Image (tube, grey):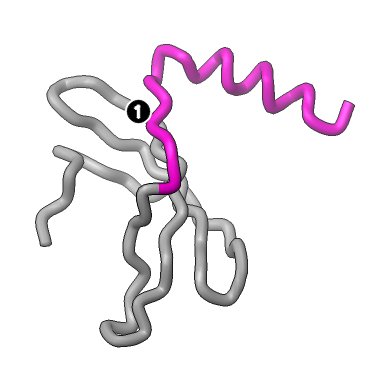
Protein backbone atom coordinates (compact mmCIF):
# COMPACT_ATOMS: atom_id res chain seq x y z
CA UNK A 1 0.00 0.00 0.00
CA UNK A 2 1.42 3.38 -1.01
CA UNK A 3 1.79 6.10 1.58
CA UNK A 4 -0.38 9.23 1.50
CA UNK A 5 2.69 11.38 2.20
CA UNK A 6 5.37 12.26 -0.36
CA UNK A 7 8.00 11.90 2.37
CA UNK A 8 7.81 10.74 5.98
CA UNK A 9 10.37 10.38 8.75
CA UNK A 10 9.39 8.69 12.00
CA UNK A 11 10.51 10.84 14.96
CA UNK A 12 9.18 8.64 17.75
CA UNK A 13 6.48 6.35 19.12
CA UNK A 14 4.43 6.36 22.31
CA UNK A 15 2.67 3.20 23.49
CA UNK A 16 -1.01 4.02 24.07
CA UNK A 17 -2.15 0.51 25.09
CA UNK A 18 -1.56 -3.11 24.05
CA UNK A 19 -3.19 -2.56 20.65
CA UNK A 20 -2.33 1.06 19.79
CA UNK A 21 0.70 3.32 19.40
CA UNK A 22 0.99 7.04 18.72
CA UNK A 23 3.46 7.78 15.92
CA UNK A 24 5.02 11.22 15.56
CA UNK A 25 6.38 11.87 12.07
CA UNK A 26 7.88 14.72 10.06
CA UNK A 27 5.99 14.50 6.76
CA UNK A 28 5.52 16.41 3.52
CA UNK A 29 2.87 16.56 0.82
CA UNK A 30 2.86 18.77 -2.25
CA UNK A 31 5.85 20.76 -1.05
CA UNK A 32 4.36 21.54 2.39
CA UNK A 33 5.77 20.12 5.61
CA UNK A 34 3.90 18.94 8.70
CA UNK A 35 4.28 17.16 12.01
CA UNK A 36 1.84 14.24 11.89
CA UNK A 37 0.67 12.83 15.24
CA UNK A 38 -1.46 9.77 14.64
CA UNK A 39 -2.81 6.68 16.40
CA UNK A 40 -1.74 3.41 14.80
CA UNK A 41 -3.61 0.16 15.52
CA UNK A 42 -2.16 -3.34 15.60
CA UNK A 43 -3.32 -5.68 12.83
CA UNK A 44 -2.64 -9.15 14.26
CA UNK A 45 -3.41 -10.82 10.91
CA UNK A 46 -0.45 -9.05 9.29
CA UNK A 47 1.61 -8.49 12.48
CA UNK A 48 1.97 -4.77 11.73
CA UNK A 49 0.73 -1.40 13.01
CA UNK A 50 -1.52 0.52 10.60
CA UNK A 51 -2.54 4.20 10.64
CA UNK A 52 -5.99 5.13 11.88
CA UNK A 53 -8.02 8.23 11.06
CA UNK A 54 -7.37 9.46 14.61
CA UNK A 55 -4.68 12.07 14.29
CA UNK A 56 -3.68 15.46 13.05
CA UNK A 57 -1.12 17.06 10.77
CA UNK A 58 0.25 20.33 12.11
CA UNK A 59 1.89 22.68 9.56
CA UNK A 60 5.56 23.26 10.33
CA UNK A 61 4.98 27.02 10.41
CA UNK A 62 2.74 26.43 13.47
CA UNK A 63 5.38 24.43 15.34
CA UNK A 64 6.43 27.34 17.59
CA UNK A 65 2.79 27.79 18.68
CA UNK A 66 2.54 24.08 19.48
CA UNK A 67 5.75 24.22 21.53
CA UNK A 68 4.52 27.18 23.59
CA UNK A 69 1.22 25.40 24.30
CA UNK A 70 2.96 22.18 25.32
CA UNK A 71 5.30 24.09 27.65
CA UNK A 72 2.19 25.14 29.63
CA UNK A 73 1.30 21.51 30.35
CA UNK A 74 1.91 20.76 33.98
CA UNK A 75 2.35 24.38 35.05
Q: Is residue 50 above or below residue 71?
A: below
Q: Which quadrant of the view contains residue 28?
A: top left
Q: Is residue 63 magenta?
A: yes
Q: Secondary structure at mark 1?
A: strand
User: Taking 2 as reference, is 7 above or below it?
Assistant: above
Query: Which residue occupies the foreground of this view, 41 or 24?
Result: 41
Quadrant location of the C terminus? top right
Task: Give how far across and how far down residue 5 sits, in percent.
Answer: 19, 40
- For mark 1, what is the residue? 34
State the residue at coordinates (51%, 73%): 19
Instruction: Rate crowding at label 1 as few (under 14), some (14 to 19) or many (20 or more) other CA atoms within 10 Å.
Output: some
Q: Which residues are magenta?
A: 54-75
The answer to which image quadrant residue 72 occupies is top right
Quarter of the figure with residue 43: bottom left
Q: Residue furthest bottom?
A: 45
Between 61 and 49, which is closer to the camera in this rendering? 49
Left or right, 3 with respect to 40, comes to left
Taking the spot 34% from the left edge, 57% from the top edge, the residue there is 51
At x 44% / y 42%, what residue is drawn? 55
Q: Is residue 52 above or below residue 20?
A: above
Q: Is residue 56 magenta?
A: yes
Amino acid sequence: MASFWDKEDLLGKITKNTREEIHIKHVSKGGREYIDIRTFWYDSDEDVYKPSQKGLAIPMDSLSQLRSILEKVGE
